[in-house]
Amino acid sequence: MVFFRQKNRDLSDKIDKNRLPIHIGIIMDGNGRWAQKRGMMRFYGHKAGVNAVREVVKASRELGIKYLTLYAFSTENWKRPKEEVNFLMDLLVEFLSKEVDELNKNNVLINFIGDISVLPHKCKIEIERAQNVTKNNSGLVLNIALNYGGRDEIVKAVKKICTKILNKELSTEEITEQTISENLYTKNQPDPDLIIRTSGEKRLSNFLLWQSAYSELWFTEVLWPDFGKEHLIEAILYYQTRQRRFGGV
């Protein structure tokens, strides 16, 4: 343990504090494979993944990251076996009921993005509590993406804009990229500078599609339950080697 703390400290020293990504998004992938490699059921992988969430949130806070978005449950995840979906919903309730007070103590503001309306009642109760308890905090903003899909988010944004046009609150000539951004779940937040995906897969899987236009992407073979502070630092160090042009020269 002392060795890993020293290793993380050594890696942290290499980070340029003036060039930190403001917003990091993470596609937390590989829980099922982590469990299967150990001869366990997938449920155990999801349970182990909670520890990685805890560590990465803490590390992000310590490193000075302002926004962290975690892809927890996608609009496509409803296709999984019912038993697994139910387990994930129970795990969400357990995580929030146990962690919110500690997160609040550490000045973390918890925000949820996605269509929360269709989640089980027990989830909505804990979500509302988490948001209310932490709403005045000024530290790390933790976005938890639940029943979230990038395409669905854009469709909902377009519908909101169409409603404003029908109500004569907006004209088609006034629509800009900013108009779209202001009608997304992440309105008033900066786009992600860095998106991380674990488990070796190299795709966005419908995550922050509009917002990730100029994000740097970092993929790792590490499965999510094994992902820790040292991997987050590696991703940040990679990000700091990139020259971001935003379409320019």
Image (spheres, rainbow, N blue to C red):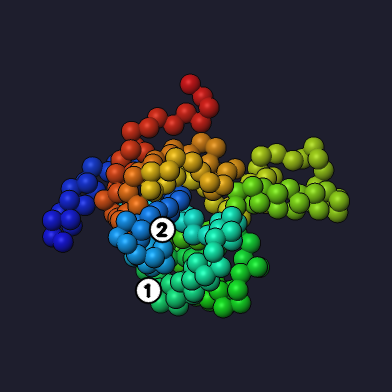
Packing grade of label 1 (10 A; few <14, some 14-19, many >=20) is few
- The answer to whether 82 appears left or right of 172 in the picture is left
Closest to the observer, 128 or 218: 218
Picture disc at residue 80: none
Q: Position of residue 57 (x, y in %)?
A: 37, 60
Amino acid residing under circle 1: Glu
Q: How many numbered badges does the structure rendering display?
A: 2
Amino acid residing under circle 2: Gly
Q: Can residue 204 be seen in this snapshot?
A: yes
Residue that lies at the very extreme toward the left in this rendered image: 3
Which quarter of the figure has residue 60?
bottom left
Closest to the observer, 154 or 63: 154
Of the numbered discs 1 and 2, the one sitting upstream in the chain is 2
Tell me if label 1 and label 2 are in contact, CB under 8 Å.
no
Q: Position of residue 90 (x, y in %)?
A: 49, 74
Q: Residue at x 74, y 40 (%)?
A: 175
Relative height, residue 152 to residue 237 (above, below): below
- The answer to whether 37 appears left or right of 134 in the picture is left
Q: Residue at x 38, y 63 (%)?
A: 45
Picture disc at residue 102: 1
Relative height, residue 70 to residue 194 (above, below): below
Q: CA distance from mark 1 to mark 2?
A: 28 Å
The residue singled out by tag 2 in the image is: 32
